[in-house]
Image (tube, helix red, strand yellow):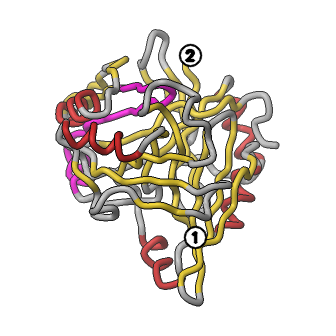
Amino acid sequence: MLLEGNLTGFQHLGIPVTNIGNAKQWYVDILGFEIIHEPEIDTPEGAIRLAFLQRQDIILEFYQLVGDDLEEVKQRAHGHIDHFAIDVLNVQSALDEVTKKGANLSPETPDGPVGIPQFWPKGVEYFFLTASNGEKVEFNRRLDLDQKRRENNINGWSHLGIPVTDIHRSEVFYQQFGFDKVMQAVIPVEDQEIKASMMMFNDFTLEFYQLLPADLEDIRMRKDGFIDHVALDVRDINQAFEELKTAGISPLEDEPVELPFWENGVKYFFVRGPDGEKIEFNQVL
């Protein structure tokens, strides 16, 4: 297993935005996130503004770039990482709550909650919202889980959704890091099928889904999107960097990069997964 004893689990989800004020307000007012850290990075073109927001075990990193980088963000669409999902006890109550606060349903679920009976032992119910910068936020209920497991309806992580072109290849890649397959499903569509699986590491779940052949070209053409990257936490960033290079997984940086975040700073680097998704490895110093 790669990074054994070094990799600890999920750290944050990176979302570049065109207006960080709007993003903060939407997630605080509608989804109940709290702002926990707001650093800035000075550049010759101006300050890059950031905000880390948290709800339960979900931490989101919003960042408003400057210059040409900001213009590139304005052109983004749904990317390699498609959506993130929040666990709920009752999807209709959750929908009623967030729409009263001004949230809008995504075009993918225009009529509200839908179900997939093939997921988990008893199926799931879910709906998508379109968030402040165009990203999709899913609200997801697993029907096999005890409704009395907590009091609050809207909680933290359900999963992170990544559409893939070869589900087996993606499973093998993430298994290197200790992710275990905890669910697999096949959804029949006429004479074809959609394949899906859930893989978990330390309570953080990735959802992979391989769509119908006619849809795969769209997945192949995707670029970095509204949701830019997922960051995983490590204890020793330099060791992680060297270990992945030795294993043939090439970092996008020449060496780990240090930034003045939190109390003592952070160091990070990126790699790409099988379908181009960006995976950040990050150590809080």
Specify the amino acid type for callout 2: Leu
Above or below: residue 285 compared with residue 124: above
> What are the residue bounds of the magenta stretch?
52-74
Residue name at image x 68 percent, y 55 percent = 121
Left or right, residue 222 beside residue 281? left
The residue that mark 2 highlights is: 285
The residue that mark 1 highlights is: 210
Residue 130 percent location from the top left of the image: 27, 51
Above or below: residue 4 compared with residue 217: above
Residue 136 percent location from the top left of the image: 35, 52
Specify the amino acid type for callout 1: Gln
**Residue 43 visible in image:** no
Left or right, residue 270 beside residue 122? left
In the orientation shown, which residue stands out farthest toward the right?
1
Q: Is residue 173 magenta?
A: no
Which quarter of the figure is the C terminus placed in? top right
> For the residues carrying marks 1 and 2, which lies nearer the camera in this image?
1
Above or below: residue 95 compared with residue 80: above
- Front residue of 29/202: it is 29
Residue name at image x 48 percent, y 32 percent = 156
Mark 1–mark 2 distance (CA, rounded to whole Å)? 38 Å
Left or right, residue 80 beside residue 255? left
Q: Is residue 70 magenta?
A: yes
